[in-house]
Amino acid sequence: MKNDPKILVIEDLEHINKLICSYLENDGYEVFSASNGKTGLKLFNKHYPDLVITDVVMPETNGYEVCRQIKSKESTRLIPVVLLTSLDDNESYIKGMDVGADDFLIKPINKFLFLARINSLLRVKKLNDKLDNSWNLLFSLARVVEAKDKSTEDHTQRVGNLAKKFGEYLNLSDEETDTLFKGGVLHDIGKIGVPDNILNKSGKLTPTEYDKMKNHTTIGKEICEPLQSMTDIIDIVLYHHEKWDGNGYPEGLKGKKIPLFAQIVSISDVYDAITSHRQYRKSFSKEKAIEFILSERNKSFETKLVDIFINNII
Ligand SMILES: [Fe+2]
């Protein structure tokens, strides 16, 4: 059927290949099969299956290489890969883990155990797809904000990249630097709820207009809140206008009470904003921007973070 999950089976031994395919087809899956890794990868690129089952020892391209290629691409790394092996030894497991395999099955295959594992991996895949869709939706929304705000193109991407670089300098984990990147891209997402005439006003905002502008932090928090796993990103969205001396918004947090990730995105945002050309003002040169950021030590930003930013990030 059209909406049945698609599974790719790569196995060079014909009788095992046929057996696995029959188990899967009888369980309602749409199955594609190949007898070697090279043809398997071609079928993979043609059909984008929901799950791959591959033998390890095969002529030409082996199962580890098939897995490595699938896991090395951002667009396909979340597709589960199951390695089939008759080698029940630690070395094969370690090698399989190294290339990012999601599960291992030892031949001969027990039909019921096999199908239970495949079903469970596909359930995880479905959840990941949902999460991926949510991210795509949020990133699209960030693009809409950029167009609405008439900011320079790719401002949020640059903020994300600067924040990520900062995280790498601090030796944070891949997951944490990824959070900094995503938070950088999404930090102003709440501007979707701020009227265009306020966002694009070239003169000074009235106190009422300024209050409406400030709401973008809390609106952004509400937009991101349904994604429970985004706690750190929500902190960035909510607190990226807080200032070290307590004169920021929305809560007037002071010093170390401001989450570190929000501080990193804040300094990256300010630097990129002042060095980018806007309709209503000229951009700062790098030297002038550094001078400005330095003048904000102990006011908008923590001195230590300013020094790292200026000496190592830009
Ligand atoms: Fe903002």
Image (cartoon, helix red, strand yellow):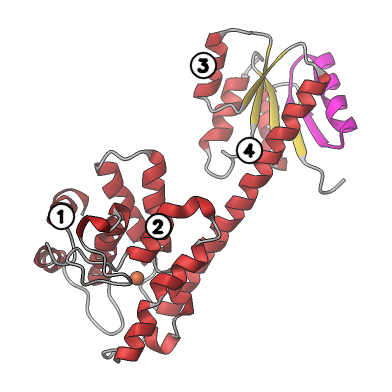
Of tags 4 and 2, the one toward the viewer is 2
In this rendering, would 39 be left or right of 252? Answer: right
What numbered label is drawn on residue 310?
1
Is the CB atom of the residue marked by disc 3 within 8 angstroms of ligand 1's nearest atom?
Answer: no
Q: Which residues are magenta?
A: 8-33
Identify the residue position indicated by label 2 in the image.
Answer: 183
Residue 145 percent location from the top left of the image: 46, 73
Of all residues, the one furthest to the right in this rendering is 26
Q: Earlier in the sequence, mark 2 or mark 1?
A: 2
Label 4, label 2: how far apart the Cα atoms are: 25 Å
Label 4, label 1: how far apart the Cα atoms are: 40 Å
What residue type is disc 3 on?
Answer: Ile
What's the residue at 66%, 41% (across, down)?
A: 125
What numbered label is drawn on residue 94?
3
What residue type is disc 4 on?
Answer: Ile
Identify the residue position indicated by label 4 in the image.
Answer: 79
Q: Earlier in the sequence, mark 4 or mark 2?
A: 4
Label 1, label 3: how far apart the Cα atoms are: 42 Å
What's the residue at 38%, 87% (across, down)?
A: 198
What residue type is disc 1 on?
Answer: Ile
Q: Earlier in the sequence, mark 3 or mark 2?
A: 3
Q: Secondary structure at mark 3?
A: helix
Q: Are marks 1 and 3 in contact (CB under 8 Å)?
A: no
Q: Residues within 10 Å of mark 2 (few under 14, many from 20)?
A: many
* Viewer-nearest residue: 299 or 18: 299
Residue 263 percent location from the top left of the image: 27, 58
Label 4, label 3: how far apart the Cα atoms are: 20 Å
What residue type is disc 2 on?
Answer: Gly
Q: Are marks 4 and 3 in contact (CB under 8 Å)?
A: no
What numbered label is drawn on residue 205?
none
Residue 108 percent location from the top left of the image: 77, 11
Q: Residues within 10 Å of mark 3 (few under 14, many from 20)?
A: few
